[in-house]
Image (cartoon, rainbow, N blue to C red):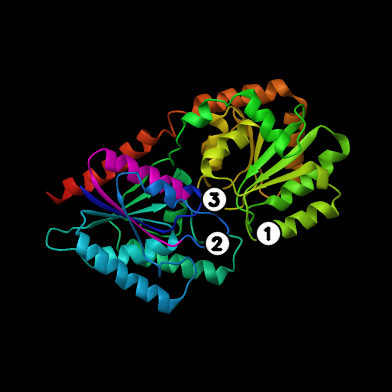
Amino acid sequence: MKIVHIITRLILGGAQENTLITCKLLAERGHDVTLITGPAIGPEGALFEQTKTAGYKTIVVDELRREINPFIDISAYFKLKKILRQLQPDIVHTHSAKAGILGRYAGWTLKKDSKLPLVVHTIHGLAFHPYQNPLLSKFYIALEKAAAQKTDAFVTVADTMTEKAKAAGIGVDKPYTTAYSAIEEDAYLSPPPQSEIDAFRKQYGIPNDAVVFVKVARLFELKGHEYVIESARRLAEKHDNCYWLFVGDGLLAEPLKNQIQFAGLEGRFKFTGLLPPEQIPLAIHSSDILIHCSLREGLARVLPQAMLCGKPVVSFDIDGAKEVVNKHTGFLIEPENIDQLTDACEKLLEKSDLRNQLGQNGRIAVTQQFAPNTMVDTIESVYQKLINNLV
């Protein structure tokens, strides 16, 4: 098949890593694959290096930006339409909100008598959520409902995404398929040498015998770092052997550091800044417990990443988290509930046997579920079903 994937930007992020794995494996399976993306602008880093030797073509459309700007967005739409007309794909597969809207409209307008290209959209996370202005939520839902009419099939990264999209009236008459977001598993399943872990801890001033809570996320709103800091303030009063590691960068770096200083916790929090994807397994293996306090997420890849490393997880019960986090793999707690967060962290802090047991349970649970070939088998079958229905 001739397949075009479209995503807004190749920053360091779950949707982006998911898309790159999909493009790479589809190309390895003999499909003609092109990836169209916008520029990677901002402090979140870029993944363009991974596209250079992956066996598919990459096209950058400079006007494809995350921010809403009608003039630039219209230009991006016409550029996408022109590129798709030249490529003549069988499948147009879009990702993320902006590329999802513009890409689906551009692809749909090029359908011919053969009803090609077929248009597929992956929902990695929903643009609307309870923590935004209700009018803005209604606007996003209206956009998604309209774009759903230009969509042949949906792929979601969690069953919960399907449920929420349908509940909002988005594409209720279209097929939905869950394909859990793939992870390149080897580096997570195989721990690095202890010397590398010791060196990593030494680099950030963390004692070898400390219990480390790690949070891997952009330093951005709705990612929940402030809840971790408040929980840490309570725990640090009673326990002097625990540290917190924030992996990532973003606009809230300085405000978060100020909050930590105000709480008197400067020595207990360590910031790695932006790490390349290949160093994330080392950061998790060098820690003991993963905390995920985001208030909105499709299904955060860092949850199964931590489980593959054999680490227990503590997560707010949002979106797809409950599909991997349960009493056998960690603690699922109410969003914004700092009492529950502190209690769960304290139990894991005090009981190394519990940490080990939950971590091993998690590894067994997610290894096959998040394997790259599992995801791409599912996506490829969605394409094939659509093609078969045309015959």
* Residue at the image position 55 percent from the left and 59 percent from the top: 129
Q: Which mark is residue 228?
A: none
Packing grade of label 3 (10 A; few <14, some 14-19, many >=20) is many
Q: CA distance from mark 2 to mark 3?
A: 20 Å
Packing grade of label 1 (10 A; few <14, some 14-19, many >=20) is some
- Amino acid found under the numbered disc labelled 2: Gly
Residue to which mark 2 is pinned: 42
- Amino acid found under the numbered disc labelled 1: Leu
Q: Earlier in the sequence, mark 2 or mark 3?
A: 2
Residue to which mark 1 is pinned: 252
* Placement of 28 over or under 96, stated as above or below: above
On the image, the x and y values in percent for residue 175 come to 31, 50
Tag 3 near tag 1, CB within 8 Å: no
Residue range of the region highlighted in magenta in the rendering: 15-39
- Would you say residue 254 sits in the magenta stretch? no
Residue to which mark 3 is pinned: 297
* Residue at the image position 74 percent from the left and 24 percent from the top: 351
* Residue at the image position 65 percent from the left and 47 percent from the top: 293
* Residue at the image position 70 percent from the left and 42 percent from the top: 245
In this view, the residue in front, 307 or 344, is 307
Q: Earlier in the sequence, mark 3 or mark 1?
A: 1
- Amino acid found under the numbered disc labelled 3: Glu
- Residue 162 visible to an observer of this rendering: no
Q: Earlier in the sequence, mark 1 or mark 2?
A: 2
Q: CA distance from mark 3 to mark 1?
A: 18 Å
- Would you say residue 31 sits in the magenta stretch? yes
On the image, the x and y values in percent for residue 196 come to 63, 29
Position of 381 compared to 214: left or right? left
